[in-house]
Amino acid sequence: MPTADVVICGAGIAGISAAYQLTVRHGLADVVMVDDQPPLSVTSDKSTECYRNWWPGPGDTMVRFMNRSIDLLEELSAESGNRFVMNRNGYAYLTADPARAAELERGAREVEALGAGELRIHRGGTDDPPYPEERYDELDPGLTGADLVLDRERILRRFPFLAPDVVAMLHTRRCGWLSAQQLGMYLLERAREQGLRQVRDRVAEVVVRGGRVAAVRLDSGETIATRRFVNAAGPLAPQVGRLAGVELPLLNELHGKVTFDDYLGLLPRDLPLMIWTDPVELAWSDEEREQLAQDPELSWLLATMPAGVHFRPEGGAGGRMHLLLWTYHLDPVETVFPPHFDPFYPEVVLRGLVRMVPALAEYLGRMRRPYVDGGYYCKTRENRPLIGPTPVEGNHLLCGLSGYGIMASQAAAELLAAHLLGTPLPGYAGEFLLSRYEGPAYLEKMAAMTSGQL
């Protein structure tokens, strides 16, 4: 019977990052990664592929966790010659509602206090701090925190395509995006060089004897003897958890993205991730409204839609593509592969973006065929991950990474390796354990948590 020091279930960014940590960073000689799908193909490349250290409380857990993960991503970028094209374009949260502008300021002061960096406020006065407007690759790499701009003239001078009634912009700085596929492949290549074994198969059973992991049986009939198993199965983590007799408090949401061809050249390329933080009423003609009102299955499109429609450039300076994203249905769903998206999803997202960028109305009725894909955000109720041991000895979790798996992957894998190998744990480790739900203090804190999700 073959053996392994560790068997990892899942070849997404979580599983690959765990394999990298164990083999490259810790020199573990015998690590096996099992997945019946090609690496990074189910969920890892289906998101915005963005990162940020700007996270709400209560407590500084998520800020510290993401700051550590971004530290590690920046190290990987430097050592690989930025093979995965990591940038510092930032995020721009925008509103046309003065009340929401006040909320942005209150929230930003909170996140500043949690350690995400200095908040610089620009109100349009002569004593305003300087507003950094250089390209992301020319910015001081030490620039962190955020710039809250409450001066409409300055906002529109920087982004003249925005809706003219915009009143505030929170431009967070230790944020940007990267190529998840290239990051994952770089880590995978390094792990292979150190002996990682990949098995194209499906985990059928986690064999537990005497309360601890003893082996992993595969669909093919092969059994691998091991005393350490990692559930890094992304949206399939709940099913894999049951294979070891562990129920996980996870749910799945379906999130889509649209790859949009800006063939009219209406949008600049040197942009942050642009996020509209106000609820939106879609732009319809009177005739369209009448038709929608008469269709019970589509009349919901006349209602006020949730906040959070966003977009970013995709590709280099000479490209035309942008990623458009908006999750307006957040009900938990059953996982189906490949995922199914409403055929009118691209138009709904585009119509939502018209509120932020009025010029995009030029594309209504003349949008070139967009490409739609996406994946499942596998998340806990409070949207914090599950990392570490379970009541079954040797059974470990690296899951529940929701829509932030790319940005969290390196700190999450580092934390998992510390649990597996018995090295010192960071201070935030306890808040990611499955056992956290047994503590009254954590449950009380949960009541005050927001998801931090766009």
Image (spheres, helix red, strand yellow):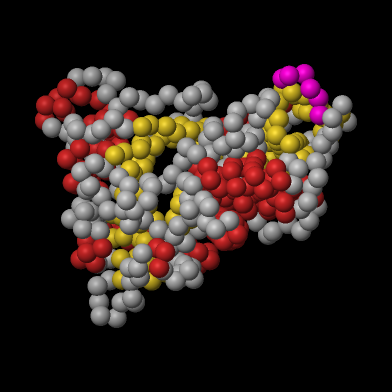
Instruction: Spot the residue most to the left.
Output: 286
The quarter of the picture where residue 149 lies is bottom left
x and y percentages locating residue 110 in the rendered image: 46, 63
Residue 378 in view, yes or no: no
Above/below status of 246 relative to 53: above
Q: Nearer the viewer, residue 2 or 248?
A: 2
x and y percentages locating residue 134 in the rendered image: 35, 68
Q: Where is the N terminus found, in terms of image quarters?
A: top right
Above/below status of 233 relative to 336: below
User: Would residue 367 be found to the left or right of residue 319 on screen?
Assistant: left
Residue at the location (42% across, 32% down)? 373
Instruction: Spot the residue most to the bottom.
Output: 127
Residue at the location (64% across, 26% down)? 36
Q: Nearer the viewer, residue 446 or 125?
A: 125
x and y percentages locating residue 305 in the rendered image: 30, 38
Residue at the location (37% across, 61% down)? 171
Q: Is residue 220 magenta?
A: yes
Magenta part of the protein: which range? Answer: 219-224
Above/below status of 396 relative to 427: above
Tag count:
0
Q: Is residue 77 magenta?
A: no
User: Would residue 107 be found to the left or right of residue 394 on screen?
Assistant: left
